[in-house]
């Protein structure tokens, strides 16, 4: 599981982006300023830095410089400013990419996967029984056969894999999937998507062994 340090002072962006990244199988630590970011870099091992240019107690450029001195950590700048000077400054400091706010979630995810792949830091494979999920390539294999999932089915599977061993209530699943791919998700549609997912990944969808129903509580993947 790739570890991402998110440095951003907007609570809304922190909340929504952290949830999106965790649903994709990433581990996320969020901090809000230059000082806390530098402290986090000293004590934790991260695979990617998502970094706002403007911070309340300093500059993202200083954090980028420190990150590059500590093992050439990949950096993607998140900036409200898409002017040429800001972009060039970030790239000159060694940033691997940048994306301007407001950004499209799927575009950001694509860039994250690309940077992790290029840097060799992508820890991308989940295994569950004979199921193998590669989050960099976005592929799901059952044995040697590729399983074709819709965008929402794929994200539902990642939510389960990222919470292995935990019972997830139906309301928690609805909240996790809400508006991630621009589709309306409620309790009824959740039932449909769980049924479809089981039909594609279970040996016997009528007797599921991967996505287990915990009566009265919700669903669980793994022990």
Image (cartoon, rainbow, N blue to C red):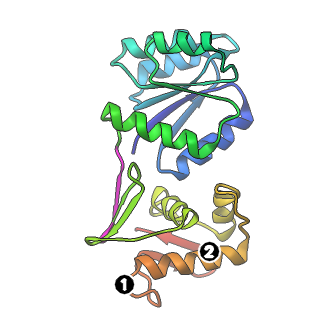
Q: Using residue 188 as the reference point, say whether residue 141 is left or right of it.
A: left
Q: Which residue is mark 2?
A: 217
The residue carrying pointer 1 sits among few (fewer than 14), some (14 to 19) or many (20 or more) residues within 10 Å by Cα, namely some
The residue carrying pointer 2 sits among few (fewer than 14), some (14 to 19) or many (20 or more) residues within 10 Å by Cα, namely few
74 inside magenta stretch: no
Q: Using residue 182 as the reference point, say whether residue 221 is left or right of it.
A: left
Residue 100 image offset from top left, x and y in percent:
64, 28
| Whole-number angstrom distance, CA of label 1 to CA of label 2 | 24 Å
Looking at marks 1 and 2 on the same chain, the residue that comes earlier in the sequence is marked by 1
Residue 110 image offset from top left, x and y in percent:
50, 43
129 inside magenta stretch: yes
Q: Residue at 47% across / 55% down in the picture?
A: 162
Q: Which residue is mark 1?
A: 203
Q: Is residue 169 above or below residue 71?
A: below
Residue 107 image offset from top left, x and y in percent:
57, 42
Q: Which segment is the magenta one? A: 123-131
Residue 45 image offset from top left, x and y in percent:
38, 29
Q: Which of the image's four quarters has the N terminus? A: top left
- Helix, strand or loop at label 2? It is loop
Q: Residue at 54% across / 12% down in the picture?
A: 88
């Amino acid at each position: 599981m790739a570890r991402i340090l998110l440095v951003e002072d907007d609570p809304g962006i922190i909340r929504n982006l952290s949830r999106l990244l965790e649903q994709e199988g990433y581990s996320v630590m969020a901090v809000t300023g230059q000082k806390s970011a530098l402290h986090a870099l000293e004590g934790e091992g991260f695979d990617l830095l998502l970094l706002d240019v403007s911070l309340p107690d300093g500059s993202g450029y200083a954090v980028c410089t420190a990150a590059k001195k500590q093992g050439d950590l990949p950096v993607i700048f998140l900036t409200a400013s898409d002017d040429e000077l800001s972009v060039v400054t970030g790239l000159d400091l060694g940033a691997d990419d940048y994306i301007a706010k407001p950004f499209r979630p799927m575009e950001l995810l694509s860039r994250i996967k690309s940077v992790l792949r290029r840097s060799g830091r992508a820890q991308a494979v989940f295994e569950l029984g004979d199921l193998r999920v590669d989050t960099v390539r976005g592929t799901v294999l059952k044995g040697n056969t590729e399983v074709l999932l819709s965008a929402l089915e794929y994200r539902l599977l990642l939510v389960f894999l990222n919470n292995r061993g935990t019972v997830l209530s139906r309301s928690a699943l609805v909240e996790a999937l809400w508006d991630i791919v621009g589709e309306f998700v409620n309790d009824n549609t959740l039932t449909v998507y769980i049924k479809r997912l089981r039909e594609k990944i279970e040996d016997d969808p009528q007797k599921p062994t991967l996505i287990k129903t915990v009566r009265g509580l919700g669903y669980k993947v793994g022990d």
